Structures are given as structure tokens and as C-alpha cells.
């Protein structure tokens, strides 16, 4: 915050590729491997993909560029980066609230995201040991319900995932975030290629690919378009302070626009690859592609349990899901750790303090599925309430704040200087999008989600 003793001697990414891999790792999470396939299934397949890609170009990319720009301009954590930039632009220090809201969002999201990531980690071993081999739908559902009903199992897996996250973040940018991205992201891509190869051997491959890539606009609705709009915003880790924090480590002279475009392209490719791996398995087993979140933890275990080699490839799938979640949890912890470091704390003490606090909130989310299930907030358990608060309120408001501050609070000269684009057509198009298109789109998503 303004007036707080700060240090700006942050590390830098070792290369542009390191930043891209880390940023893609943040963006590629459960939203790509879990959410994108099932919302595609619910909204007509290929036609939804076309609309989603248009939304990414119009909203996701402009705001991503703005967040990275803010981070590199301020060279500090989200709160202090926005505060410092506001002072330089002669704007109100209250703009720091945008960074505070984003950092708070990543803090809260990590607490319950780690619980779901723990499910994926648990399912690696369950699938590998043949737990679901020959199981029927009732057995698979009962196994998932039993996991959620066990406070000790949920807390155990949540604890394991938070420990994995803290170990990486505590090692710093070069030795922690960067090294993890260079290992986990190629590993994730390799697992996807293997699973797509497996999907190609199934009888449902043709139907799955057609479902994903053949547009049928008759199945699109206004609801579908708004879902695509919302997912285009959330899939890139926008509104969480993450890209501001990651941007603060980006070396001067690195093309922000080109780097952001690389992140968007890779994130989208991985989402489509995930769909290509999942839908053939669904169709080969005569299952319904539009079954919602249960597709991952109930439908797919049933499918893998009935297929030759299902134990191996099912375990690989949940390992993929674990990798994707891990690269995201690392990024969710970083903004808070960076801010604590600026307040004079060492990297490891800051990491441990942040991780333990977030872990404690996550325990409450885990218990809300079982022993605390009777306690509700506006009709939802704590997990659901925190999910709703962050996804529908905190993230859109942060994204809106970023768009308004960069589009209207920063001078055109400052934005152009940081992007290094000059008064080119590309810059003018981006500036138009960040000033008008993106704010309107975010407001539409915000209002729609609250109705």
C-alpha cells in the first residue's frame, strides 16, 4: 500500500520462453482440462468453440496485455504496482484497490482450488490400482461421494497439494516458478499427446472430433455466448493479480503483446487438445458429453474402468489434471508471497506464512463437504460460497478495474511506451478494445452471473 516500505529488487525470468511457459502454466488449469470440455459439451460443441475463440481475441487478449503491462510498469506486487503506476500518472492512490482485490481473489481461490486439485491427486492412485476396473456407474459415484464425505481424506490431499505448491514458490522465480514450468508444461503436453493417441484408437474418435470441431450454430443460444464470454475471461487467469505479478518479473524490451499472444494461443491449443483426448472416450462408451463437472470424476473413471488399458491411461489422465492444477496453484500463491517480500520478509518465511494461512481457509472449504455441510452462506456451503464470490464478483471487478485504469487512468503515451508498439494500428486496436470493448463485456458477464 502507499507509504509502506517496499523493495523492488525482484528477480527476472531467465528468458521470454520461461515467462510464456509459466504464464501458460497458470492459465492452463482445471479450467482447460475440466471445465472447457464440459461447457463445450453443454453448449453445442464446435459452434461454441468458434464463439469462444472470438471472445478470447476481443476480451481475453486485451486484458491479459493490460495486466502484464501493469506488472512490468510497476515492477512490484499487484497492490504496489498499481499504486506506483497511479502515482506516476497523477491518479488517485485508491486505484491500488484494484491490485488488492486481485490479490485477495487469488488468495481465496487457492484455498478451495487446492481442495479440488487434491481430488485429482487422489484419483491418480485410485485409477492406477484398478479401483474402477469393471465398476458400474453406481460404484463410481459412490467412490466419489465417499471421498467428499471423508474429512480426513480431503484435508490430507489438500495438505499434500499445498505442500507441493509451497515447495516450488519458496524456491523463487528462477529456481522455483521457472524450473517447475519448464518441467511441468512439457510433461503436460506429452501426457496430452499420449492420451490423444489413445483416444485415436477408440471407436469414438471420429464422433468426438466432429463434436468438438464441427460448428452447429443452431445449438447456440444467448446463454452459450455469455458462457463463452465468461470462460474467455477466466481461462487466462485474469482478474487474480497473477499476470501483474508475473509481469513484474518480465525483462525490459520483451514484447508484451507478442508474449501475451503466445500465451493465448498455447492456452487455447491445450484446451482443444484436452477436448480431443476426452470426448472420444466419452463417445466410445456411449456416455453423455454434456454432464457437467461430473464428467471428470464420475463419467471418465467409469469409461476408463471398462476399456483395455484403462487403468494406465486413466492414471495418466489424472496425472495430467494434477500437473495442470499444480502449475495454477503455484501462480495463485505468488502474488501474496511477492507482496510479503516487499514488506521485508524473506522468500521462504513469506511462502510459509501465506501457504499456511491459505491452507487453513482451505480446510474449512474441505470440511464444508462433510462435517460442516449444515452451515451455509446464502444457501451454499462455504466451498460454493467462496467459488461464487470469487468467480462472479471479485474477478470480474478486478478485470474491470484493470481495463479502466490502463485504458483511461494511464496516458496513451505511457501505455504505448511500455508496450513498445508506437502509434501503430495494432496499438490503436488494443487501446480501443481495452477502453470500450473489454469493460462492456466484463460488465455484461458480471451482471449476467449475478442474475
Image (cartoon, grey):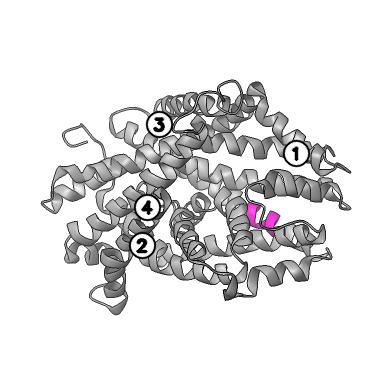
Residue named by callout 1: 141
Residue named by callout 2: 441
As drawn, is 299 to the left or to the right of 30?
A: right
Inter-mark Cα distance, 1 to 4: 33 Å
Give the quarter of the image for residue 434.
bottom left
User: Is residue 175 something that shows in the picture?
Assistant: no
Q: Are marks 2 and 1 in contact (CB under 8 Å)?
A: no
Q: From this viewpoint, which residue is outermost toward the bottom?
A: 425
Q: Position of residue 288 (x, y in %)?
A: 73, 57
Q: Main secondary structure of the magenta part?
A: helix
Badge 3 crowding class, 10 Å Cα cut-off, few under 14, some 14 to 19, many 20 or more, is some
Q: Which mark sits nearer the N-terminus, 2 or 4?
A: 2
Q: Nearer the viewer, residue 409 or 72?
A: 409
Q: Secondary structure beneath disc 2?
A: helix
Q: Which residues are magenta?
A: 187-192
3 or 4: mark nearer the eye: 4
Q: Nearer the viewer, residue 280 or 293?
A: 293
Inter-mark Cα distance, 2 to 4: 9 Å
Q: Is residue 190 found inside the magenta-colored segment of the image?
A: yes
As drawn, is 388 to the left or to the right of 271?
A: left
Q: Secondary structure beneath disc 3?
A: helix
Q: Which mark sits nearer the N-terminus, 3 or 1?
A: 1
Amino acid at each position: 500500500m502507499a507509504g509502506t516500505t517496499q523493495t523492488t529488487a525482484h528477480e527476472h525470468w531467465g528468458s521470454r520462453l520461461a515467462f510464456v511457459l509459466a504464464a501458460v502454466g497458470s492459465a492452463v488449469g482445471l479450467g482447460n482440462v475440466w471445465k472447457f470440455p464440459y461447457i463445450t459439451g453443454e453448449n453445442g460443441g464446435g459452434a461454441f468453440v468458434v464463439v469462444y475463440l472470438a471472445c478470447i481475441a476481443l476480451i481475453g487478449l486485451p486484458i491479459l496485455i493490460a495486466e502484464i503491462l501493469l506488472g512490468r510498469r510497476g515492477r512490484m506486487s499487484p497492490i504496489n504496482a498499481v499504486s506506483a503506476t497511479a502515482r506516476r500518472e497523477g491518479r488517485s492512490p485508491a486505484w491500488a484497490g484494484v491490485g488488492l482485490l486481485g490479490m485477495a481473489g487469488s488468495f481465496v481461490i487457492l484455498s478451495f482450488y487446492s481442495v479440488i486439485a487434491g481430488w485429482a491427486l487422489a484419483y491418480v492412485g485410485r485409477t492406477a490400482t484398478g479401483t474402477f476396473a469393471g465398476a458400474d456407474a453406481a460404484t463410481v459415484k459412490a467412490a466419489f461421494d465417499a471421498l467428499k464425505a471423508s474429512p480426513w481424506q480431503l484435508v490430507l490431499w489438500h495438505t499434500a497439494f499445498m505442500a507441493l505448491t509451497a515447495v516450488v514458490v519458496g524456491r523463487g522465480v528462477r529456481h522455483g516458478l521457472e524450473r517447475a514450468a519448464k518441467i511441468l508444461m512439457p510433461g503436460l503436453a506429452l501426457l496430452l499427446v499420449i492420451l490423444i493417441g489413445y483416444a485415436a484408437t477408440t471407436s469414438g474418435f471420429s464422433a468426438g472430433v466432429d463434436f468438438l470441431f464441427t460448428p452447429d450454430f443452431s445449438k447456440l443460444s444467448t446463454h452459450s455466448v455469455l458462457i463463452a464470454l465468461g470462460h474467455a475471461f477466466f481461462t487466462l487467469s485474469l482478474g487474480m493479480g497473477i499476470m501483474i505479478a508475473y509481469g513484474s518479473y518480465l525483462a525490459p524490451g520483451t514484447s508484451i503483446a507478442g508474449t501475451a499472444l503466445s500465451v493465448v494461443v498455447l492456452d487455447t491449443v491445450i484446451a482443444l487438445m484436452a477436448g480431443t483426448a476426452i470426448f472420444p472416450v466419452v463417445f466410445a462408451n456411449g456416455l453423455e458429453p454434456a454432464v457437467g463437472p461430473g464428467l471428470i470424476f464420475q463419467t471418465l473413471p467409469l469409461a476408463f474402468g471398462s476399456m483395455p488399458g484403462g487403468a494406465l491411461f486413466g492414471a495418466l489422465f489424472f496425472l495430467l489434471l494434477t500437473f495442470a492444477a499444480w502449475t495454477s496453484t503455484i501462480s495463485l500463491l505468488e502474488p501474496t508471497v511477492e507482496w510479503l517480500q516487499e514488506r521485508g520478509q524473506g522468500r521462504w518465511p513469506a511462502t510459509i506464512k501465506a501457504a499456511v494461512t491459505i491452507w487453513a481457509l482451505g480446510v474449512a472449504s474441505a470440511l464444508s463437504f462433510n462435517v460442516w455441510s449444515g452451515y451455509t452462506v446464502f444457501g451454499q456451503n462455504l466451498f460454493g460460497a467462496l467459488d461464487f464470490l470469487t468467480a462472479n464478483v471479485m474477478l470480474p471487478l478486478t478485470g474491470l478495474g484493470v481495463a479502466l485504469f490502463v485504458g483511461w487512468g494511464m496516458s496513451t503515451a505511457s501505455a504505448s511506451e511500455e508496450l513498445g508498439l508506437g502509434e501503430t494500428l495494432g496499438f490503436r486496436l488494443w487501446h480501443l478494445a481495452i477502453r470500450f470493448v473489454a469493460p462492456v463485456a466484463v460488465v455484461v458477464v458480471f451482471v449476467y452471473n449475478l442474475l
